[in-house]
Amino acid sequence: MEKNERVVGLNQLMEARYKLSVREQRIISYLVSQMNVDDENSKIYSLSIKDLCEMTGVTGIKEITHGLQQKLVKITKEGAVYSVTWLSLAVHNENEGTIDIRIDPLLKPFFFQLKQELTEFQLKSSNAIRLYELLKQYIVIGEKRFTINELKEYIGVGKEGYKKYADFKRKVILPAEKEINEKTGITFHFKEIKKGRSVESLHFFVKFKANS
């Protein structure tokens, strides 16, 4: 697989994760943490449901994994678009208290890359997770400007969500800023850009923490 294909695939995987709930994202994060580069493509991962719940802070594993089997990830490779589900197999061994999970071989190379990007065990809110993943892409540049509507789309609240900017800032941006700055290896601040009397966009300034 060529480098540009890996980048395209990883970006598509990250975009697909925006459509997952926080509980689903945490299950994927934990699963990725259990994977090794030399694992066979067909390997089935047997996980303790108790450990899974304790490490991710979620319950209802059967419901969550069923949902992950229904949601598609679309990966572009060599001009073709592949549609695969997050989990190709999920077996709930209720008597043993375990769950067996298998990932589609097409996704595995991207999962290993994703392993270095995940911070769900540190971040609790889906807004913080999504904003972190968005800003991390621009860490080398150090800054990026987004319109308010672009941010709403990226974060997943939709253009019609939080119609008043003050509410969007108070309930989404500021809590996410506090959580990201406290719990991750990056830090950011932002400047409001106005068009007339209304805030039209936010200019973010992002960098790695000195000791991260």
Image (spheres, rainbow, N blue to C red):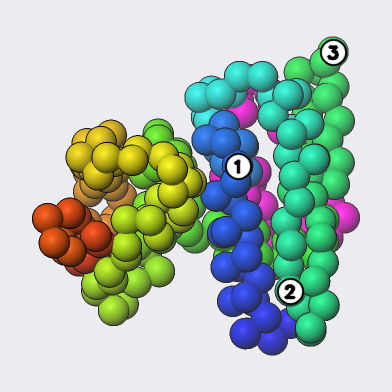
Disc assigned to residue 103? none
Please state which of the two labelled residues, at mark 1 or mark 3, is closer to the viewer: 1
Q: CA distance from mark 1 to mark 3?
A: 29 Å
Residue range of the region highlighted in magenta in the rendering:
29-52
Label 3 sits on what residue type?
Asn
Q: In terms of depth relative to the viewer, which is nearer, 36 or 56? A: 56
Mark 2 or mark 3, which is nearer the start of the sequence? Answer: 2
Query: Are there few (<14), some (14-19), or many (20+) residues within 10 Å of tag 3?
Result: few
Where 60 falls versus 112 (above or below)?
Answer: above
Question: What residue is at 60 percent from the left and 46 percent from the top?
Answer: 19
- Residue 51 belongs to the span the image colors magenta: yes
- The answer to whether residue 169 is magenta is no
Measure the alpha-carbon separation of dots 2 and 1: 20 Å
Q: Is residue 81 above or below residue 55?
A: below
What type is the residue that disc 2 sits on? Thr
> In the rendered image, which quarter is residue 87 located in?
top right
Question: Is residue 211 visible to the viewer in this orientation of the structure?
Answer: no
Question: Quick one: 176 or 147, which is closer to the camera?
Answer: 147
Q: Position of residue 73 (x, y in %)?
A: 73, 56
Query: Does 57 sit left or right of 79 as displayed?
Result: left
Asked whether residue 51 appears in the rendered view, the answer is: yes
* Closest to the observer, 174 or 38: 174
In terms of depth relative to the viewer, which is nearer, 30 or 81? 81
At 19% from the left and 55% from the top, the residue drawn is: 199
Q: Which mark is residue 20?
A: 1
**Residue displayed at 78% across by 31% down:** 66
The mark that comes first in sequence, 1 or 3, is 1
Image mark count: 3
Q: Residue at x 76, y 18 (%)?
A: 97
What residue does disc 3 label? 95
Which mark is drawn over residue 76?
2
